[in-house]
Image (cartoon, rainbow, N blue to C red):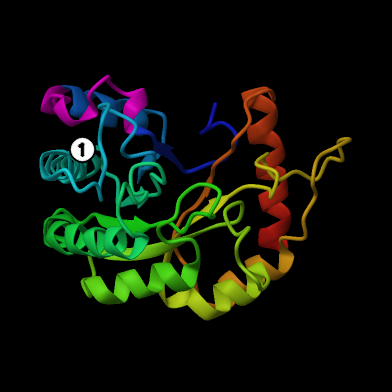
Amino acid sequence: MIARHGFQGVELAPYTLADDPTRISPSRIGELRRTIEDAGLRCVGLHWLLKAPAGLHLTTPDRAIRRRSWESLRALVDLCAGLGGEVMVLGSGKQRNAQGIDPEAARASLIEGLAELAPAAAAASVRILLEALPEAVTDVVNTLRESQEVIRAVGHPGVSGMFDFHNCRDETVSWACLIARYGDMIRHVHLNETDGYHPSLATRPGRRRSDFGPAFRALADQRYDGWVSLEIFHAEDQPEAILAETKAFLDTMVCD
């Protein structure tokens, strides 16, 4: 269905593949990759990285949990590479929240873990992309500026940033201004409406219809050549309609 509507790739959430995606066998990884490629698609990469196995947390003061969490991310690097993916979007707001420590201490722990993981990711031709999330979701890295600060502190090409239209609630300037300002670190784009639905040319009561044109022109001005990956937060619409309407919307952005 994805391929039939003219899309070129699929971004996967590891927890949908197995109860413990860090233990998927090489043969199963190969099978999954063939399934994707046989449909004429590519694996874009991974997102929702730490939902499974349960109990992971990247910045907790508990060293054993913290070590297991970073080891899980390291295993997901191999999964991503095995599937042919290039990016791992690190959102996971709950799993990076400050737990009984100052958010700055949690941020320092995040930087330390990313710096240790970055060489392995780069060696596997995978890039870890830190996602800025609003304060309602997490208290660690809420804006693109803060994401940029962490990325610069890590200082390794294996770690960079991304842009998510929906998660800009704490930003104070437009999408286009953000893309122009932080374009050098944007290596992936999550496409969604501000209300979490898919972008569409259709008008529905109670649904947002934002003006994406300036943002896409800003991406073009930055010579962005990465993926634009649909991510929705609501599931009541039929998949066929979501894909068809999103593709029609994207076609107008390309024409503009």
Three-letter amino acid code at the position of disc 1: Leu
Q: Quadrant of residue 131?
A: bottom left
- Residue at 37% over, 50% down: 89
199 with respect to 100 (left or right): right
Q: Residue at x 46, y 59 (%)?
A: 132
State whether residue 256 appears in this view.
no
Residue 101, image x, y percentages: 30, 54
> Visible in this render: residue 60?
yes
Q: Position of residue 222 (x, y in %)?
A: 52, 77
Please state the extent of the stretch shown in magenta in the rendering. 14-27
Marks counted in the figure total 1
Indicate yes or no whether the magenta region holds residue 176: no
Q: Position of residue 34 (x, y in %)?
A: 27, 28
Q: Which residue is mark 1?
A: 79
Q: Nearer the viewer, residue 114 or 81?
A: 114
Q: Is residue 227 above or below residue 182?
A: above
